[in-house]
Image (cartoon, coloured by chain):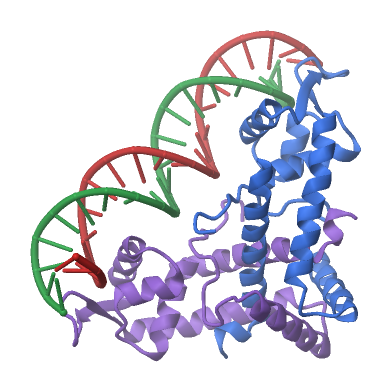
Chain colours: A blue, B purple, C red, D green
Amino acid sequence: MQLDDRSVFLLSQLGHHVADRFADELAPLGLRPAHFGVLTHLRDGSGLSQQQLADLLRVHRNVMVGLVDDLETQGLVRRAPHPEDRRAHAVQLTGKARTLLREAATVADRLEETVLAPLDDGERAQLAALLHRVAEHAGLPPGVHPALNRRPSRRG
Amino acid sequence: MQLDDRSVFLLSQLGHHVADRFADELAPLGLRPAHFGVLTHLRDGSGLSQQQLADLLRVHRNVMVGLVDDLETQGLVRRAPHPEDRRAHAVQLTGKARTLLREAATVADRLEETVLAPLDDGERAQLAALLHRVAEHAGLPPGVHPALNRRPSRRG
DNA sequence: TATTGTTATACTCTATAACTATA
DNA sequence: TATAGTTATAGAGTATAACAATA
């Protein structure tokens, strides 16, 4: 069997391609995928601790320090005192971050449109359904976790 | 729109998952995905130069030095004099490598079966066809190039 | 002058450990 | 005694530049 006939190979290849493209298009906004992941998790329930964020994104809390530092420097989050634990920070989104998240959503929409361009609406729904079932069977967390820390490609 | 409803997100998530799993299952054979990629390219037309292999796998020739070193140490390839260019090496598979490639194919088959378990035969064909079209439209090289250098996961 | 293989170097990421302040 | 955040350090990976041999 040819390597490129295997669905697992195609999945891996396409997954990396899409992640790279997303990192590239996110870069002009000053974000890496991991930053986007943090902001996304804060969108609904603001005030998560860094440890909670680290668990959600499957990174070590040491890494989360740097990510929150980056976002704080850009004025996208603030470290507020945590109402229930004086050791922790309640990381909160700023208005600027909410604006930026809308731009990031546009980026994602545009990427989805580009990638799925060869498929009609019915086929897109088919693909999404199949991927959903496979992802669920693989036990992948439905929320977030794109395998972060992917930087924009150097040759893009 | 929820993040996990986007096909691009599912693709990225699944792609990384599959690549990680493949790296994990390849590790007991003493190979990383990049090694497997090199061996695969040598399977048909043995005698490629390191530079040719580097181009095919989209890595720098400096990196290929180390990969070929690894494979040579394990007795999977040999550096033969290149018949047409005395600067280059003709990298050739050994019989041991051909045996190992069959084992690696079994690993890939088993992984494909595990990942696609929730789909019946018709759905698997559907998925493969859709992925093929998307990959082709994205301009992904049909041969190889799984976004190599992925190591087995530490927490696997 | 350009290219193949090689080595050395710097830079980035990740992982681990340790420290502080709280709990 | 354990946990949240932080910092420092070491390791692995990648990228760049340079070199010798050959084209």
Task: Provide residue A99's location: percent of width, then percent of height.
Answer: 83, 39
Q: Which residue is drawn at 83% across and 19% down?
A: A82
Rendered view: A26 above or below A83: below
As drawn, is B13 to the left or to the right of B81?
right
**Total marks in image:** 0
Rendered view: A47 above or below B52: above
Front-most of B25 and A109?
Answer: A109
Rendered view: B24 above or below A144: below
- Can residue A81 be seen in the rendering of this structure? yes
As drawn, is A12 to the left or to the right of D10?
right
Indicate the quadrant where residue A69 lies: top right
Q: Residue at x 87, y 19 (%)?
A: A84
Indicate the quadrant where residue A24 lies: bottom right
Task: Provide residue C11's location: percent of width, then percent of height.
Answer: 41, 39
Front-most of B107 and B53?
Answer: B53
Front-most of D16 and B98?
Answer: D16
Task: Provide residue A142's location: percent of width, then percent of height.
Answer: 83, 56
**Quadrant (top left/top right/bottom left/bottom right) for the C terminus of chain A:** bottom right
Rendered view: B83 above or below C2: below
Task: Provide residue B52's location: percent of width, then percent of height.
Answer: 35, 77
**Quadrant (top left/top right/bottom left/bottom right) for the N terminus of chain A:** bottom right
Indicate the quadrant where residue A77 lies: top right
- Can residue B9 be seen in the rendering of this structure? no
Front-most of B98 and B79?
Answer: B79
